[in-house]
Amino acid sequence: MRFLGIDYGRTYVGLALGDSETKVSVPLTTFTPKNFEELTEKLTAIIQSESIDTLVVGVPLIGEQYQKQKQEILSFVEKLKQSVQISVDVYDESFTSKEASRRLQGSSVHTTNEHAVAAMLILQGYLDRYDL
């Protein structure tokens, strides 16, 4: 099975690829969609070109301060489920942005790629937890 990890944000959306054979996730890209339609077009193109079976969207499950963000992402997930023809799952993204920032500290990688690294961490956690 092939997976696309998503670190969803109002400004940036980070993506990562992974599969059940290698059980490894790698950062793919970060982009700034103008609206939901542009986002789903981009995701649909990647789903087709990469033969994706499941989308894994990061949702913050820990911390009261993330409740508004959590609701926004869950709303996005529901809209996404209606827009794509594959499975959409969620996974706890708590602390992934901080970890991505830590991993990129001191590197020459542009900071927007932090979101792709966060998507990688979300997807890797999903692959490890569910032993896919």
Image: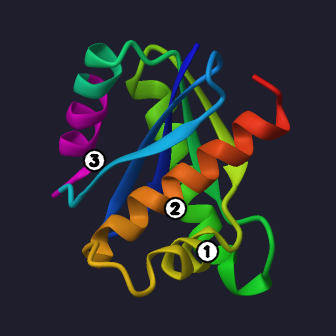
Q: Which amino acid does label 1 sit on?
A: Glu
Q: What residue type is labelled 2?
A: Ala
Q: Which amino acid does label 3 sit on?
A: Phe
- Quarter assignment of residue 68: bottom right
Q: Mark 2 points at which residue?
A: 118
Mark 2 or mark 1: name the one nearer the start of the chain: 1
Observer-nearest of 130 and 62: 130
Tags 2 and 1 in contact by the CB under 8 Å rule?
Answer: yes
Q: Name the residue under label 1.
A: 99
Mark-to-mark CA distance, 3 and 1: 27 Å
Q: Which mark is residue 120?
A: none
Callout 1: 10 Å neighbours few (<14), some, many (20+)? some
Spot occupied by residue 120 in the image (x, y as percentages of width and height) = 53, 50
Give the vertical position of 4 relative to 96 (above or below): above
> Count of labels shown?
3
Dominant secondary structure of the magenta stretch? helix
Q: Can residue 11 be seen in this view?
A: yes
Spot occupied by residue 108 in the image (x, y as percentages of width and height) = 27, 78
Give the vertical position of 45 relative to 97 (above or below): above
